[in-house]
Amino acid sequence: TLVLGIEGTAWNLSAAVVNEDEVVCEVTHTYKPVTGGIHPREAAQHHAQFASWVISNLFDEIAEKNISPNDIDAISFSQGPGLGACLRTVATAARALSLSLEIPLVGVNHCVAHVEVGRWKTPAKDPVVLYASGANTQVLAYRRGKYRVFGETLDIGVGNALDKFARSAGLSHPGGPQIEMYAKDSVKYVNLPYVVKGMDFSFSGLSTAATDALQKHTLEDVCYSLQESAFAMLVEVTERALAHTGKTEVLLGGGVGANMRLREMLDIMCDDRGASFYVPEKRFMGDNGAMIAWLGLLMYKAGDTIEVEDSHVNPNYRPDMVDVTWLKE
Ligand code: ATP
Ligand code: FE2
């Protein structure tokens, strides 16, 4: 089985073809804002402008492996969550491909795709998943036919909180990697808010407080403290989800998962609990076409295809709205 998947919920436009065993090819074109963060309309324009470039390059690459577009069994795309304008642009491209190749369309949930690519590319079988990216921050786990959300951000994603602080400190976008670099030069913790409510977390106040702390403390000390606070919140909720579900694996996903300090903190927590900790290769952590193609393949094989008329996007598509048809209990 061969499935072509397209991702474009935010800044990354990426298309890939996968089969049961591997990513056959992947082509990506990334929108880079000239100033500040992501401008939704500009990102959508970027996707519209480069969609045909990405797809034709992908077709050239599969041709080198003697695969023709007519060998593809289904087209999958991110139905949400994400920026509305970006989602609609990518959905249009996916529908056009589905109609012209006369093959079924599969609409996938972006968050669930992060989970499934992690299960594909690591030994994790039934993990508690920490999905930490720019716009999304959730703790997920499978239970009775759905990926349930055990905890999530009440405001902005942890990555956006890092990026927002970084911008106010005069660092360029994306801020996460730079904060990680500055944090390495400090071990001095300055007091910042720690906000966990029940199983949910909030990052907006933390980001603002970190900006204010720059008045009195060095950039290194604030970066260090921001990471310690934000990541401790993520680890606490992940640990409680482990305890609550009785699961024995933790899987990390999303762009913030690149951070070595976050990995270290999760690793220590898992060690203490006797749980296994899994991190996929970096290319599968941030937004990528391969994960959309892979979940598309799982759903296609489960008969989970949609008609073009029913292929509307949903910017607030939650992972727990998806029936996990491809997993047998
Ligand atoms: P989504 O649509 O899933 O929210 P996204 O558009 O935010 O995805 P990702 O690639 O998943 O894209 O994540 C990007 C985020 O990851 C940015 O906020 C960036 O600052 C953050 N990030 C990247 N590398 C690091 C790092 N080393 N440490 C901390 N944060 C990082
Ligand atoms: Fe993502």
Image (cartoon, rainbow, N blue to C red):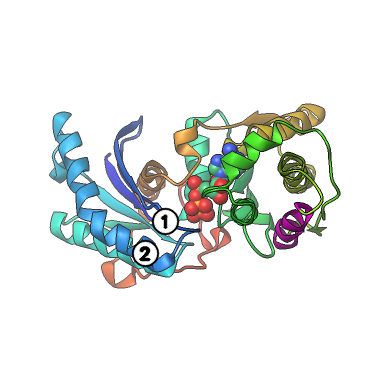
Q: How far apart, in angstroms, are the residues tagged by discs 1 and 2?
A: 8 Å
Q: In this view, does 314 lie to the left or right of 25?
A: right
How far from the left and from the top, in percent, is residue 201?
Answer: 74, 57
The residue at the point 47 percent across, 62 percent down is 82
Dividing the picture into quadrants, the one containing residue 208 is bottom right
Horizontal and vertical percent position of residue 171: 57, 48
- The residue closer to the viewer here, 308 or 154, is 154
Task: Give the answer, above or below, for where 202 lies relative to 183.
Answer: below
Q: Position of residue 297 (x, y in %)?
A: 35, 45
The range drawn in magenta is: 202-214
Tell whether label 2 touches label 1 (CB within 8 Å). yes
Q: In this view, does 186 lie to the left or right of 32?
A: right
Which residue is drawn at the image coordinates 63% and 61% (left, top)?
Answer: 156
What x and y, as percent, mark residue 215? 78, 54
Going by the numbered disc 1, the residue's amino acid type is Pro
Specify the farthest residue to the right: 191
Which element carries disc 2, helix, strand or loop? helix
Residue at disc 2, CB closer than 8 Å to ligand 1: no
Characterize the local packing of mark 2: few (<14), some (14-19) or many (20 or more) Cα atoms within 10 angstroms: some
Disc 1 or 2, which lies upstream in sequence?
1
- Residue on which disc 2 sits: 42
Type of residue at label 2?
Glu
Residue bearing the label numbered 1: 33
Look at the image and tell me whether residue 306 can be seen. Answer: no
